[in-house]
Amino acid sequence: MIMVKRYSRIAAWCLTPVAVMSLWACNDHDATPDAAGDDLAAAFEAADFPHEASDISVDPAVRYGVLENGLRYAILENDTPSGTAALRMVFDAGSLAEDDDQRGLAHFIEHMAFNGTTHVPEGEMVALLERYGLAFGADTNAFTGREVVGYQLDLPSNSEQMLNVGLFLMRETASELIFDSEAIDRERGVILGEERYRNTPIRRFFNAYYTFLYPDTIITERDAIGTVEVIETAPAERLEAYYNDYYTPERGMLVVVGDVDADLIEAKIRDGFDISLEGLDVEHVASFASWEQPSPAAPDPDIGTVEDPQEPEFGFFYDPDVFTLITVDVMEPGLAAYDTQDARFEDLLRQLGNSIVQRRLQSAINRGASPLVQASLSYGNEFDLVNKAGLFAVSSPDRWREGVATLEQELRRAQEHGFTQAELNEQLANVRTSLRNAVDQADTRQSGDLADGVWSSWIEGQVFSAPSDVMARFEALEDRITLEAVEDAFNRIWTASPPKVMVALNQDVTDGAAAVREAWLASSAEPVEAVEEAGVTEFAYTDFGTPGEVVSTSRIEDLGVDQVVFDNGVMLNVKTTDFEDNVIRVRVDFGAGDLTPQPTAAAGTILGAAFGGGGLEAHDRDELQRLLAGRSVGYGLNVGPDYFAFANATTPTDFELQMQVLAAFMSAPGWREDGLNQFRTIAEEIRRGQNAQAVQVAVNRVGRMLRSGDPRWGFPTAEEVNAFTMEHARTMLEPALQSAPIEITIAGDVTTERAIEVVASTFGALEDRDESWPSYAENAEIAFPAPTEEPVVVTFNGQDYQGMANVYYPTTDGINARERRAYDLLRAVYNLKAIDRFREQEGATYSAIVSSQQSRVSEGYGFFWVGLDVAVDDIERMYDIADEIALAMANGDISEDELQRARNPVLESIEENFERNPFWVNALSRSQTQPEDLDQIRSVEADYREVTVEELVELASRSLRPDAAYRVTILPQSAVQQDAE
């Protein structure tokens, strides 16, 4: 897997869900190491880990160590999820370390790690992991960026055998990869498939962007995917050379986080351990200390230099399918500062200023009047070359000049007039709440997120701190955060050098760079005024009337669920858990969703995107954002196949406010055009991006074809978006808001008593709800298209060699849970075969799509999808192979081993889901309206365990029939035009 966006020099929790708050925990500094003093520089250079030299406290729960050969390791005991562990092996080197004839080989080696080692023959590693319950891709993966290569295993069990397997495979990766020439040749097609898949407008833009910013470096030339020429021709010796040079102990770090004994893990790392694996000739795993460090070690790459900009520079990039992007960057050559308390405080000030300007831009976007549809400001060190203040925005294509002017003027407005105290208070409230939530939730962080946080902190030269320490430092220094300090910090980074401004556009412009310059300079001649202090407003929806009375309660003991009904008909399901400290997940279901008669085509899709942007009667969206600053509260409408739903995660502190906000949207939505205007602005950009990738065309345009053109599926057309109004939104949704039965599901750190109290005063106080609601059964009918003798051809705006073959075998609906789960295992078995055949044997695709989609709403409707992103010339034979696999399975070609390899990851996933609140809040939703769902929860594990090979063969013979299949070939416009000529 290629890391599309490199890891900047920022702290680990800015990069993963471990994030406590990027504004404070991240150290994206602009000072050079020399500014910290010679002693500080020497200390950091000599340290094995940043905390050894920093005045920032490290998280004491992490056990760090260094072996004699230089390998670093970190171990953290963590029991969320219980009985699991996360392993990571990362190397401080990436594609920037490649020679010219190795471009792409860092990524190539990542692929070869799964294709044979000293003790694991080619083709056995993935199968070995699957037998232990790890799904390829979901639990077993790797990544390559310009500055890092990494391997990850999320172990579903903490048994000693499972831990031994994980450590064994990491030890094999460290020094035991085998570069067999025939295996390399077989893998070339897979990597070419990945290059083909990732050759998108946004990737081409970023390469052009890096060339614009860093013209005297090799950064653009070291895109991790490399060059087609090297992928096709590189000999084994050049892969081995990179492997020997950069897969070295001193560049490596091993991280183990999970429900483990740290002493036991450390002993295995240091001393090795015995192991027995069926089918493999291995009895003992050598210690990681036995891995030899080469001498001399390969040097860090020379990637070039960046000159201190002397005047503004302007760039332009044209691609017919690129989003309209505007970037503004102010760069100051230098290294990242060392991670100290002073550096982090200075960064907090800078980030607060950036956040205020970003909030100003978002405010205009919220109103639907801005030429922009998205904007974000950032600051960080890139590639150890520059400290860069950056502004990245998406604009409406026909208003890009206005977009340039908007960015220029907002930056200048901040520099000339500064900020208001209300603006700073809003951002400080957000910081404070994020830090407090991180402290409250620290004990139930996910092991995988923590593992990623530990290694990326090391890679970025950061101290991995406990959330409580981050919070304490913030509180100790909060009185130093003044308007003047924030304004000074902001101005320093945005006036450090003349800006570099670039526009990416889907329309070619004569002398585009000059046009960008003209737009920027014309804007800079316009005066800007200060922002007026916003008035203080209180949230208007705290009293919904007399709290509702509970009329019935029941306890479902085996599932730990309480079910409650209020006198106005509102139903409540509550499951108290300890899976996430100080997190409460809420879902409010009502109405019939997409089954509701739709006043215009695609009304449900557009409604879901636009509704929240209309705000409430008393507060528009922008005012709501100010009112909810610093509160863990959200809103938004989900339009499902047969339901509408509000859903969000909150905290015990903000639980009541969260329910007040959702009840307000139920009873007093604003119905403003703001959200619709914003969606109209961005819809064309989304559609253009979708039309540049074959898989997006398959999901959206072909997805609609598979339902005989039903506009409830796929992304809406421009005509459908333009035809929709907020009056249509009211027509479709308002009756359900006012009268439909409501079923609320709450899971997490909350008692049933507290849930009843809060729901009674909000939803329980609403007017009586109807006892039932129309099912609109006639709208549930969907027709699968007739079989095709020749594939239907759909075109997209891809490159001339990009294509896709798609086979859709009709199946049946998913109303019967037992049958639906059997089809899921059939899909998993087909996927195993697809990986082996299409990827490993044929080398035709990077990743085959195998999906079983069975409606739980539309009786009789379902299909089995095999999607193959391949070269245009390979499409025809892909259909033959897909049918060959299907027919073989129908004729009995399914083994017990394949069934177990398909089933084990599913069972492990079920076990983990039972310890996740997101699973419970969704599984229990509507369980009073649809009580059969409770039995489906109870039976899920048994259903998967009971499926037999014979059952799968019967399903395959019934459904995987080539004569009934619908086939769609997706071709680039250029290929169709050539055929026509």
Image (spheres, rainbow, N blue to C red):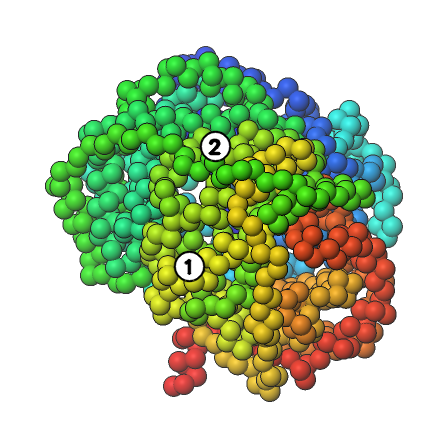
| Badge 1 amino acid | Arg
| Badge 2 amino acid | Arg
- Disc number at residue 730? 1
- Disc number at residue 689? none
In this picture, residue 581 sits left or right of residue 306? right
Which residue corresponds to the image point at 83% horizontal and 62% vertical from the top-left? Answer: 947
In this picture, residue 926 sits left or right of residue 267? left
In this picture, residue 950 sits left or right of residue 465? right
Residue 913 pos. (x, y %): 71, 46
Residue 4 pos. (x, y %): 49, 49
Mark 1, secondary structure of its residue: helix
Could you say which quadrant of the image residue 192 lies in?
A: bottom right
Could you say which quadrant of the image residue 231 lies in?
A: bottom right
In what quadrant of the picture does the C terminus appear?
A: bottom left
Residue 415 pos. (x, y %): 23, 30
Which residue corresponds to the image point at 43% horizontal and 53% vertical from the top-left? Answer: 611
Q: Is residue 241 visible?
A: no
Which residue corresponds to the image point at 13% horizontal and 38% vertical from the top-left? Answer: 527
Q: Which residue is mark 2?
A: 631
